[in-house]
Amino acid sequence: MSRILIVEDEPIIRSALRRLLERNSYTVDDAGSVDEATNQFNLNDYNLIISDLRLPGAPGTDLIDLAKAVPVVIMTSYASMRSAVEAMKMGAVDYIAKPFDHDEILETIANIIKLRSDDDTAATPKNSARPNSSNEMVGNCPAMQNLFSRIQKVAGTDATVLIQGESGTGKELAARAIHQQSARASSPMVSVNCASIPESLIESELFGHEKGAFTGADATRNGLIEAAHGGTLFLDEIGELPLEAQARLLRFLQESEIRRVGSVKSIKVDVRLIAATHRNLKALAKTGEFREDLYYRLYVMELQMPPLRERGEDIIEIAQQFLQRSCDKLGSPLLKFSDDACTTMIRYNWPGNVRELQNAIERAVILADDHMITTDLLGLDIEPDSLAELESSFASGNSLIGDTGFKERRADQNLSLDDYFQRFVLENQDNMSETKLAKKLGVSRKCLWERRQKLGIPRKPKE
């Protein structure tokens, strides 16, 4: 069992973090300052130390040297992110922004401890055909194999990379895989979501500012690009970047230098840029919403993240991974998917992609009463969106259409999908329960109810 030391001066935060880790099978000790931690505990007895950046007395970064071989994670507020990145340059393995997300902090801790364990047992091969296990990218479909190959090729260069794909497909995981396989892996990777920072602050956040540059700028501050010096800058949702900031970013890419807001002096920086977006930047460039010259600067190497619905059997592999993690997190015995649930997951469209799959599985684990995850627990509505899909379902023996002759009547009368659905329900609801009707139609009971409401099909009154 892994041992973790928490160093945090706020009792509420310290207690909440301790309870979270203990619920997830970690052995935890805590202290309120660096002095208290060193006086009461042997730092080398732990697998990981999690420390706040600002503590009474010595700062949390002092633990990096005091702990020597033990990895240290720094906790910080968003406003102190630059300081946290500086802490990583001093030797911290990662930083966690407050208020932290429980899933995020547990995933970070598990990855760090696993990586340390792997380093103790065997050296990780330098050149791998696919990203290492810590970033959890899995997949054997052709699209993912092509992605892994491209990541391996581009990781050894300093080329700018543009990652495109729908929301929830794992674009940041791909960026981390590139960084981890590059020569910059020992330097920080700074991740910035351009959509989450107010437009009035984005330039200051990225490029820094001089004292007095604007109201409230009471001190000179480094920007996130400067903080990533020697490492990698990941700009997520770059399509949301304002045009003024785009011009500054273009200069950074062309000249490898930045100028803080309010300064006339340029600063040379050595930063590799990886950008990501779910939007069509080329189309935005044509309408003037995105700089065309910046688009071509970003478009050196493109990586396309495939949507989950196009990954076939990979869905089950990813689902098994999430199921294992959710069971461990919630203290549940290891569950398994029913055959019907596996079929449903492959058929489902997954508009939210991998993120939606992860949430559906965690919800199912919470609701499960026995060892099996069923389709109902996943809460996925598979609603046929075309007449051809309904006919395919019926032809495979999942309906009574062939017995009623309804299929032939549909063809003769050229019925719409709604008419087709309505006629089938009206002709069969007298001798079928709602559950059986839904099953024959290949939809959930919730979907059947919603269609009844939409089409005004009353349920047969109970006698």
Image (cartoon, helix red, strand yellow):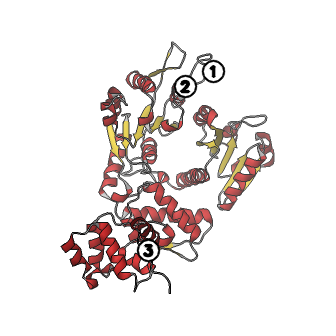
Three-letter amino acid code at the position of disc 2? Ser
Asked if 245 appears above or below 48 in the picture, the reply is above
- State which mark lies toward you, 1 or 3: 3
Is 373 or 14 nearer to us in this picture?
Answer: 373
Quarter residue 362 falls in: bottom right
Q: Residue 242: name its quadrant.
A: top left
Q: Nearer the viewer, residue 58 or 327?
A: 327
Of the residues under marks 2 and 3, which one precedes in the sequence?
A: 2
The residue beneath circle 1 is 217
For badge 3, the amino acid type reads Pro
Percent position (x, y) of residue 384? 34, 66
- Please rate how many residues cluster around mark 1, counting C-alpha atoms within 10 Å: few if below 14, some from 14 to 19, many from 20: some
Type of amino acid at the residue the image marks with label 1:
Ala
The residue pinned by badge 3 equals 458
Up the image or down, 429 lies above or below 17; here it is below
Q: Is residue 141 visible?
A: yes
State which tag comes first along the sequence, 1 or 3.
1
Q: Are marks 1 and 2 in contact (CB under 8 Å)?
A: yes
For the point 28% across and 84% down, which residue is it? 404
